[in-house]
Image (cartoon, grey):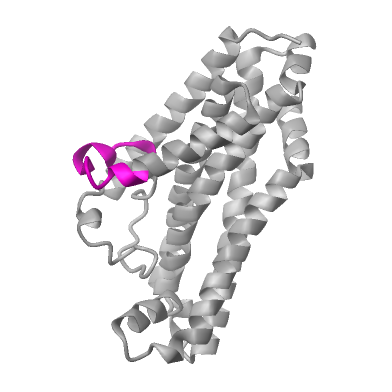
Amino acid sequence: MRLFVAGLRKLIRRPATWVTFGMLAGLMSLIFIAVGSTADRFSDEPEGAAALALVTFPGAYDGVLNFLLGLGGLLAVIYGAAVAGSEWTWGTFKNAVARGEGRARYLVVSFAAVSVVLAAGVLLAFAIGVGAALIGATLAGVPTTGLGDAAALGGLPEKLLRGWVAIVEQGALGFAIATLARSQLAGIGAGIAVYFAEQFSTIFFPDIVKYLPFNAAQAVVDLSSAGGFGGGDRGPALAERLAPDVALTVVVLWLLGATVVGALSAERAEITG
């Protein structure tokens, strides 16, 4: 518990934590507000109707979640790699081992702290995103009566929990890659490369790619009512995605696998310097 609390305190003070979630919340706010402020120019076009769906409640809830699973997942990869890579770059892992901490235990507890920070970040970013969507709806003149939709609000806790698991899994991949590379920059670069390589591979290997970590993570929540960001109008790609429950199982397996790989890598790594 002491190590876990110390990890949380360290992460809260790190600029990377605030930059990551600030960037996510800022970009999300800009998009929703921009959609609301320009919707009247394209209201008679098909694209305009799709844009208005982003700020129309209760579907806007799914739009925010879809944004979190997309850009939020990529930022989670970068954040996980940045945290794990800094353990080697700054020498904190070596110092912890010198104090007698178990290697695998230290890495696992450190990632547990990252998971808690990601949970707080998801909740905060979601709240900011909903607020931005509400502003966008007001600017577009869209009724906000769906804001208090009982069915949508009742399903939010489960969707947020599933979304958090998906984002943690993506953070775990970045964490594991940076631990293997023993470098912050290499971990971030490799994590981003793997993320985009998987997204582009969807076109060529849909039956295989849907089981890979990032595609599975984007399928853990049923976002059929989301628009614009790909929730309800993704064309053929949507049909190739896993069912949410199957995707959740695959995501948990990837999460456990990435954690084990990172821990084993730390156990076998040669610490120099």
Quarter of the image for the N terminus: give it.
top right
| Magenta highlight on residue 179 | no
Quarter of the image for the C terminus: give it.
top right
| Left or right of 5 in this view: 80 | left
Q: Position of residue 214 (x, y in %)?
A: 39, 42
* Residue pictured at 54% horizontal, 15% vertical: 265
Q: Quadrant of residue 249?
A: top left
Judge whether residue 137 can be spotted in this image.
Answer: no
* Residue 170, above or below 147: above
| Depth order, front residue of 234/159 | 234
Q: Which residues are magenta?
A: 199-213
Q: Position of residue 262 (x, y in %)?
A: 53, 21
* Residue pictured at 27% horizontal, 45% vertical: 202
* Residue pictured at 35% horizontal, 61% vertical: 223
* Residue 34, above or below 264: below
Q: Position of residue 149 (x, y in %)?
A: 43, 76
| Left or right of 30 in this view: 59 | left
| Left or right of 97 in this view: 80 | left
| Magenta highlight on residue 208 | yes
* Residue 205, above or below 33: above
| Depth order, front residue of 162/258 | 258
Q: Position of residue 246 (x, y in %)?
A: 28, 41
| Left or right of 234 in this view: 129 | right
* Residue pictured at 64% horizontal, 54% vertical: 21
